[in-house]
Image (cartoon, grey):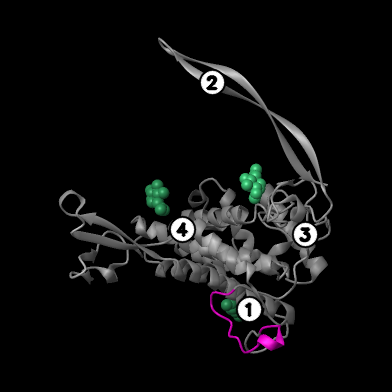
Amino acid sequence: MGRAAALLGLSRLCALWAALLALFPCGAQGNWMWLGIASFGVPEKLGCANLPLSSRQKELCRRKPYLLPSIREGARLGVQECRRQFRRERWDCRAPAAGAPFGYELSSGTKETAFIYAVMAAGLVHAVTRSCSAGNMTECSCDTTLQGGGSASEGWHWGGCSDDVQYGMWFSRKFLDVPLRNATGKESRVLSAMNLHNNEAGRQAVAKLMSVDCRCHGVSGSCAVKTCWKTMSSFEKIGHFLKDKYEHSVQVSDKVKRKMRRRDKDQRKVPIRKEDLLYVHKSPNYCVEDKKLGIPGTQGRECNRTSEGAGGCNLLCCGRGYNTHVVRHVERCECKFIWCCYVRCRRCESMTDVHTCK
Ligand SMILES: *[C@@H]1O[C@H](CO)[C@@H](O)[C@H](O)[C@H]1NC(C)=O
Ligand SMILES: *[C@@H]1O[C@H](CO)[C@@H](O)[C@H](O)[C@H]1NC(C)=O
Ligand SMILES: *[C@@H]1O[C@H](CO)[C@@H](O)[C@H](O)[C@H]1NC(C)=O
């Protein structure tokens, strides 16, 4: 995918959404231009001025160009995890337009928007923190506040390199939140508050899922002494946590008040937690194609005939039924080692049924 195509796709889509939905002015979409970085070869070599960044992000980039590889890695992590978590869903976290990583969901104010913001903000924290722990940065390193601590009586002490997410959290806020803070108009004010909340929910997920790893020392693995360090969870685990938050996400009122409130009046007393994902608008069902919104629909998606859950033909095809094709696989099989020295195999053919939604 060329970078020109990526940028063109994004800006064209942006104009389209802006015209159709009257949600975000295109300038606010500029906040997402940074995703284009993921398709650049070596962004450090291009210089901040030539990268697809909003003006504030460019300013930050000029001050901290050494963070560009982490920004790129964070974008890659977020997009990949979104696709993994949603690969069996009607919305599969893919944009129909070539080049743009996301489509209509970026600005729709739905649960899907919530997930995208959270996972992208979390990806940035994860990538920056890993770079800190790897010793690649002068402004951050391992968590040094733990050094010397531990519990002698329980036979362990802090050692090694504990991940310190603070710098990553700070950078993710600076890079992603600051450009969102200046929304004008009623609709964009509520959406911008929602997006800011979900960015933070994503970052909090990284912090919340920190765990402790230990290594034993002592005579023949007796574990008389243990060294322990704090470590971030794998990004897949964080994605799974956020998917669960998505499934239990909270609809908030679109009336602009000092604070965001639940839309459900009976539930107003239940506080909104930092880690909840929030949305304003109900999602479309993603079943049928909608060219205007850029929703591809599920026709032609591969489904599982025997599953009643996500990815099953029943749910994925929205009751339209499915087609079955027979696909032939040819592979090497029954390989034998012949003395001396080669391997002889047979060619085996197998047929599998593949089901796709009507
Ligand atoms: C740290 O820097 C080295 C050399 O530039 C690079 O190869 C490595 O991927 C970086 N590690 C992280 C986690 O950013
Ligand atoms: C918000 O907009 C005002 C006026 O356009 C500008 O002066 C200010 O610097 C902006 N603030 C941020 C955080 O972008
Ligand atoms: C289809 O779903 C069934 C039941 O959930 C599962 O056991 C099977 O592995 C799935 N098949 C594929 C190809 O994913």
Give the labeled residue for mark 4.
127
Which of the marked residues, 4 or 1, is nearer the chain's N terminus? Answer: 4
The residues bearing labels 4 and 2 have C-alpha atoms spaced at a distance of 44 Å
Q: Is mark 4 within 8 Å of ligand 1?
A: yes
Residue 128 percent location from the top left of the image: 44, 60
Inspect the image, locate mark 3, and give the three-letter code of the amino acid beneath it: Tyr
* Residue at horizontal 80 percent and vertical 69 percent from the top: 21
Q: Is residue 151 left or right of residue 326?
A: left
Give the labeled residue for mark 2.
334
Give the labeled residue for mark 3.
286
Inspect the image, locate mark 2, and give the three-letter code of the amino acid beneath it: Glu
Residue 14 percent location from the top left of the image: 74, 62
Observer-side mark, 1 or 3, equals: 3
Q: Say the numbered circle drawn on residue 79.
A: none
Observer-side mark, 2 or 3, equals: 2
The residues bearing labels 3 and 4 have C-alpha atoms spaced at a distance of 31 Å
Which residues are the magenta region? 262-276
Residue 210 percent location from the top left of the image: 41, 66
Mark 3: few, some, or many residues within 10 Å (few <14, many ≥20)?
Answer: some
Mark 1: few, some, or many residues within 10 Å (few <14, many ≥20)?
Answer: some
Locate ligand 2 by image quadrant.
bottom right
Q: Secondary structure at mark 4?
A: helix
Give the labeled residue for mark 1.
193
